[in-house]
Amino acid sequence: MNTKFLAYGFAIACTLASCGDDSSTGPSTNSSGVSQLSSSSAAINPTSTTTESSDSKENSSDSNGYSSSSQETSANSNGYPANYDPTTNTLTDERDGEIYKTAKVGEQIWMAENLRTNKANYDDTCAPNEDEPQKAESVIKKFGRYYTWINAMQLCEYRYKWAAASETDSVYHGPRQGLCPKGWHVPSTSEWQTLLDQGPVKKLLSTEWDYVNYKGTDDYGFSLTIPTENSPSASCLLTANEYAADQNYMICFQTNFQQPVKLEHIYKYQATSLRCLMD
């Protein structure tokens, strides 16, 4: 069976079935309508910033030679990564020439489209999955591709063994480029929370998102879309944080529930969408 296709099916099923207890995985909402991510049942604290200090943004590599940061990329005259154009707010992926819209939300700059680089541009031996079903280029352009945590983080040494049994055992120690273009990284749960702190979820949703009581206004140009052409009410994206030795966190926007944002977890060999954040 195609594992990538199954993986995303699991992610959506997990969301719609509210994996875990709602009281532990659902975000609270403050008086400004800002969603607060939480997961008290987590083996690893998803909102911990202890492993995301500024020290981790220095050029470094782990014991296996993998770069833990993309800071070595050249910068343009404005101090941004060379692949980013602040005039047009676009990112040009140097690996395949793909051009992505970006969005500045608060002090963060995010990709405003899901990553769509294919396995010709990275080491796809990191995780034992098959290719996802062939899709029309127009579908890939709009919704992106799916990636497992191991592939997204490019932690190929963990293909047949898992990483974290506790926070101290975690292989995640701050921004990691992974599959992202140079100067960008796989976002953490705390970085997602920073994004959510900017205001109501509706401001992050594409104007195409219109389900129940949620009509996207796309105030920031973040343009979060439905994950596939067949799912109108939920979108799940990878985070860098680990939930357990064999699972990772993902953030799910599910506007058919009272709580529109949830922190869920899936197995590391299962796949979902990815958006990168500028270093």
Image (cartoon, rainbow, N blue to C red):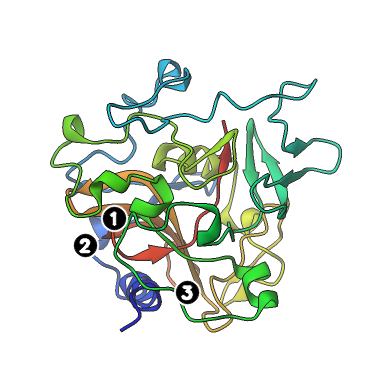
Q: Quadrant of residue 165?
A: top left
Q: Amino acid at mark 3?
A: Asn
Residue underneath mark 1: 25
Residue underneath mark 3: 256
Marks 3 and 1, Cα distance to the nearest angstrom?
A: 16 Å
- Taking the spot 61% from the left edge, 66% from the top edge, the residue there is 225
Q: Is residue 212 above or below residue 205?
A: below
Q: Is residue 193 above or below residue 72?
A: below
Marks 2 and 1, Cα distance to the nearest angstrom?
A: 6 Å
Label 1: element kind: helix
Residue underneath mark 2: 21
Marks 2 and 3, Cα distance to the nearest angstrom?
A: 17 Å
Q: Is residue 272 above or below residue 173?
A: below
Q: Nearer the viewer, residue 266 or 202?
A: 266
Label 3: element kind: loop
- Taking the spot 68% from the left edge, 64% from the top edge, the residue there is 206
Q: Amino acid at mark 1?
A: Thr
